[in-house]
Image (cartoon, rainbow, N blue to C red):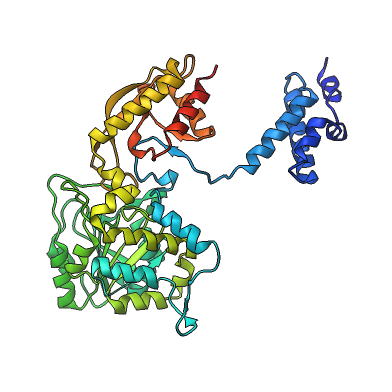
Amino acid sequence: MNANSRLRALPAVSALLERDDAAALMTSRPRDRVVAALRKSLERARKETIDGAKAPDAAAIVRGAHDDLARADRPGLRRVVNATGIVLHTGLGRAVLPKAAIDALVAEASGYCLLAVDPATNERGRRERFSEEILVELTGCEAATVVNNNAAAVLLVLNTLAAGKEVIVSRGQLVEIGGAFRMPDVMARAGCRMVEVGCTNRTHLKDYRDAINENTAAIIRVHPSNYRVVGFTGEPSLADLVALGRERGLPVIDDLGSGALVKLDAAFDEPLVADSLAAGADVVTCSADKLIGGPQGGVILGKKSIVERCDDNQLARALRVGKLDLVALEATLRLFRDKDALCADHPTSRMLTESVDVIAVRAKRLAAAVKKAVPSLEPVVEDSVSYAGSGALPIREIPTKCVVVDPPKGATAAETARRLRCGHPSLFVRVHADRLFLDPRTIQPGEDALVVEALRGVAKP
C-alpha cells in the first residue's frame, strides 16, 4: 500500500468524534479543546504515515489526543523531587520554602491582604515595611527594602548612587552569575562607569585610593559567592574600604550575594550581613532565595538615607516584588529569630547542616524501600558529597550517603535519568560512571514514596 492509500485509510475528525472514547474526553473538557487535540493527533498520524510508518488506527489517534490533553492539563511549573544533593538548585527553584512560609501564603494570600495600606490611617504604606522591621531587628541596619533579585538590588543601588559617574571595583571581583549575567554589564546598565583596580588575585588599598577622582561616586566590594581565588591572594578588608570611603566622602557598597544571616556551623565561611553592616558598609545587598531560604528576591539594607533614595528611584517600581513573595519572605525571616530551632524549621539550614550519620539512616531506609519495590535495581549505599549550589559555599563539600543504582538492563544511566526527569513524579538524580546517585540530603520529608514510584516506573520493561 502506497503513502496515499495509507493516508486515505486514516479516519476523519468527524468520524473520531462519534467514537465513545472521544466522547469520554468531552465529559470534563470543552468540545473545542477535544476537537483541537484530535486534529493535532490526526496531523501527527498523517506525518508518521507519510514518513513510512504504519497508519495508526482510530483508537491510537484518540489515545494520542488524550495524552496531549492530559499533558496540557498538568502544571508546567510543577513540583519535582530533588535527589541531586544540590541544596540550592537554581534549575529547580533554589530554596525550598519553609512550612511557615507555605502556611502564611495559604492564610494571608488566599484573599485580600494588608499590602500597601496603613490600617490606622487608611493611607498608603510601603509594601516592604513588614520585612524591613524584621531585617532591622536581625541585622542592625537602619532600613531595608526588597526587590525581585540580587542583581536588581545591585542595579538599583548603583543607579541611585552613581548614575553618570564612576564606581571602583577590584578586578578580582568581576563575577559572572548564572545565565552569563556579569557584574560589568549590570554596572553599565545601571548607568555608571566601572573603574577596575588591582589584579585578579591581589588588590591593595592604594589601588582604590589612586583611582579616586572628582567623578568617583562609590566603592563596591563584590563577594565571590560562586567561586574562590586561592593561593597568592589579598584584598583590603571591608573596614579599610569603609575608612577610605569616609575619608573621601564616598559610600561603600557590599554585595554579599548569598545573604547569610547566621553562622550555621564552625565550617561556615560565608560573610554575615550583620558583620558587613557593623564594619560600616553604607549599603549591603544579597539574595532572599539563597541562604536566607525564602522566595526569589533581592534585599537592600543599610543607611536609611540610601534606602529611601532607592525606594524613590523610578526603577524601584519596575523591580519591586509582589505580595506573595513578601508574605513568604516575612514568614521566612521570622524563623531567624530562634536560632536554636532554625535548622529544624528552615529547610535550607537543615539540609546544609544535617549530619552524615542522620543521612546514612535515611539512605539505608530508602535503599530498603527501593529494594523491596524494585529488587532488579539492586540499590546500595555509598559515600558521596552534597553541595550548597546557586553560588553559595562554592568549595564546601558536605559529606553524605547516596543510594546508588545501576540503570535497568539495556538502558544507560543518562537515558534513565532523562526518563526519571520527564516522569510523574519527576525525579532529578546525579549520574556518575553510568550509575544513578540519589542523595537523601535534598529529598524532602515524605518524598521517599515518590522516589520509589519513579524508580518503579523506569524499571518496567
209 w.r.t. 351: above or below: below
For this rendering, which residue is in front, 443 or 288?
443
Report the side of 433 relative to 39 (left or right). left
Q: Is residue 419 visible from the viewing direction of this image?
A: yes
Q: Residue furthest bottom?
A: 121
Report the side of 422 relative to 231 (left or right). right
Report the side of 207 relative to 389 (left or right). left
Q: Using the rendered view, name the quadrant where residue 184 is placed.
A: bottom left
Position of the C terminus, as image quadrant, is top right
Q: Is residue 432 visible from the viewing direction of this image?
A: no
Q: What residue is at 81 percent from the left and 36 percent from the top? A: 23
For this rendering, which residue is in front, 52 or 379?
379
Q: Using the rendered view, name the quadrant where residue 289 is placed.
A: bottom left
Q: Position of residue 217 (x, y in %)?
A: 28, 74
Q: What residue is at 33 percent from the left and 44 percent from the top? A: 389
Q: What residue is at 20 percent from the left and 72 percent from the top? A: 212
For this rendering, which residue is in front, 103 or 69?
103
The total number of labels drawn is 0
Q: Position of residue 150 (x, y in %)?
A: 36, 60
For this rendering, which residue is in front, 170 or 353?
353
185 w.r.t. 120: above or below: above
Q: Position of residue 155 (x, y in %)?
A: 38, 65
106 w.r.t. 45: above or below: below
Position of the N terminus, as image quadrant, is top right
Q: Position of residue 39 (x, y in %)?
A: 78, 37
Q: Using the rendered view, name the quadrant where residue 438 is placed.
A: top left
